[in-house]
């Protein structure tokens, strides 16, 4: 861990000092990132940004984690997750007016997107130091404070926890639905190592004395939607459920379903899991044991399930995805965030 920490410090120092070149895109760029491995809610936050900036010409640039391809590709909403990755495909399908692109070389990706857009949202690019974003948004999971974690391989930190202080905005995600200003201040001090939280400006001070907005969001689950055409809309009214989940942290998703359903079977897989023939057979077998259960999955898993050969019609007609959305805990926080985004896109780089 000490070696890893040293390598990270030297790398960041090289970029901060200018010894390594840093490029900028020709249009405003909004980076949504974190310092941990997965599960902080980057995709719901990206979708919140797209809704906030609706009406503008937008692009989303992702490396396309989990895809079997390389290089620059424009995401076809009718395509396969294996080509683009599940998260870019999900965004392309939900936001047809947004140009969604995958490229592991973010500088090249921005250059190819060009100036035909008003802004580019950079998905998971906080560690990509070769490109300087116009606005860096760093997410911290409320339930996994970064200063209580450890660097890989002993913990889930992929970057130095103090790197959150280099962000333009810190957003604490997956919070309880109600937090007082006092609780927000306590969290900022106890878990973010920031002082002087100001409810009026929704900001706090880093150890170096820099003032940064600290905003708090929660997760809202929407009405289940069918994964396949022809699904029978009555299935979500069942009182039993089978869960299929391949995301970084599925406990909140499972807990949400457990409040409304008796969970007769839970299939838990690693993040971005590619479903095998054996998995597909096991879903069919689950119907034999749970003939009256509805099948629920996440939006991200649905992108991979859509192209799974061999999925039975019985599974398809009862398979529903549960959308999630990020929501700020107060309208004032939402207004501040909206203002930051709109000022950026209206004022240029």
Image: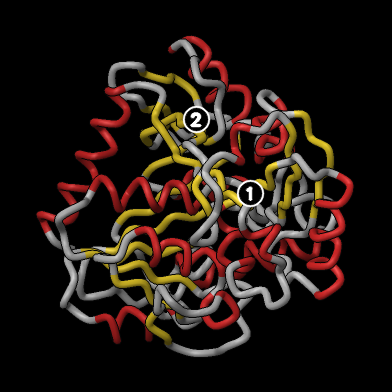
Residue 221 in the image: above or below residue 346: above
**Residue 259, quarter of picture:** top right
Residue at the spot of label 2: 218
Front residue of 257/249: it is 257
* Residue 72 left/right relative to 274: left
- Viewer-side residue, 78 vs 309: 309
Q: Quadrant of residue 130?
A: bottom left
Which residue lies at the image location 44% right of the left edge and 55% below the top edge?
A: 32
Disc 2: CA contacts within 10 A as few (<14), some (14-19) or many (>=20): some
Estimate how packed mark 1 is, as few (under 14), some (14 to 19) or many (20 or more) residues with alpha carbons within 10 Å: some
Res. 220 mark: none
Residue positioned 67% across, 74% down in the render: 308
Where residue 197 appears, x then y in whole percent?
42, 20
Image quarter where the C terminus lies is bottom left
Q: Is residue 160 visible?
A: no
Tell me if 288 is positioned left or right of 41 in this view.
Answer: right
Q: Residue furthest left?
A: 347
Residue at which label 1 appears: 39
Quarter placement of the N terminus: bottom right
Residue situated in front as seen by the camera: 208 or 75: 75
Q: Secondary structure at mark 1?
A: loop
Q: Earlier in the sequence, mark 2 or mark 1?
A: 1
Gap between marks 2 and 1 measured at Cα = 14 Å
Whether residue 106 is situated above or below residue 295 in the rendered picture: below
From the top left corner, tell me how far across and down residue 31 is, in percent.
Answer: 39, 59
């Amino acid at each position: 861990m000490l070696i890893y920490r040293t390598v990270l410090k030297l790398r960041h120092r090289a970029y901060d000092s200018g010894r390594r070149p840093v490029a900028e895109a020709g249009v405003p760029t909004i980076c949504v990132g974190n310092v941990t491995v997965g599960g902080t809610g980057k995709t719901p936050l990206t979708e919140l940004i797209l809704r906030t900036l609706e009406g503008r010409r937008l692009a989303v640039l992702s490396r396309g984690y989990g895809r079997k391809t390389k290089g620059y590709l424009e995401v076809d909403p009718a395509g396969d997750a294996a080509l683009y990755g599940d998260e870019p495909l999900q965004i392309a399908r939900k936001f047809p007016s947004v140009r969604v692109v995958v490229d592991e070389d973010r500088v090249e990706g921005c250059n190819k997107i060009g100036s035909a857009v008003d802004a580019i949202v950079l998905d998971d690019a906080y560690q990509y130091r070769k490109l300087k974003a116009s606005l860096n948004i760093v997410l911290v999971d409320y339930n996994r404070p970064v200063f209580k974690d450890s660097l890989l391989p002993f913990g889930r930190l992929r970057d130095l926890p103090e790197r959150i202080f280099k962000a333009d905005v810190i957003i604490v995600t997956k919070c309880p639905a109600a937090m007082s200003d006092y609780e927000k201040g306590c969290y900022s001090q106890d878990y973010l190592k920031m002082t002087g939280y100001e409810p009026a400006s929704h900001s706090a001070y880093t150890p170096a004395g820099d003032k940064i907005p600290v905003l708090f969001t929660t997760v809202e689950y929407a009405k289940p939607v069918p994964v396949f055409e022809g699904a029978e809309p009555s299935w979500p009214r069942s009182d039993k459920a089978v869960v299929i989940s391949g995301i970084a942290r599925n406990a909140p998703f499972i807990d949400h379903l457990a409040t409304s359903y008796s969970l007769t079977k839970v299939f838990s897989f690693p993040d971005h899991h590619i479903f095998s023939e054996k998995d597909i057979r096991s879903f069919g077998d689950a119907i034999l044991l749970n003939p009256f259960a509805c099948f629920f999955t996440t939006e991200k898993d649905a992108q991979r399930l859509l192209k799974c050969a061999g999925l039975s019609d019985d599974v398809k007609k009862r398979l529903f995805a549960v959308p999630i959305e990020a929501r700020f805990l107060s309208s004032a926080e939402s207004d501040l965030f909206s203002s930051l985004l709109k000022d950026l896109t209206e004022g240029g780089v």
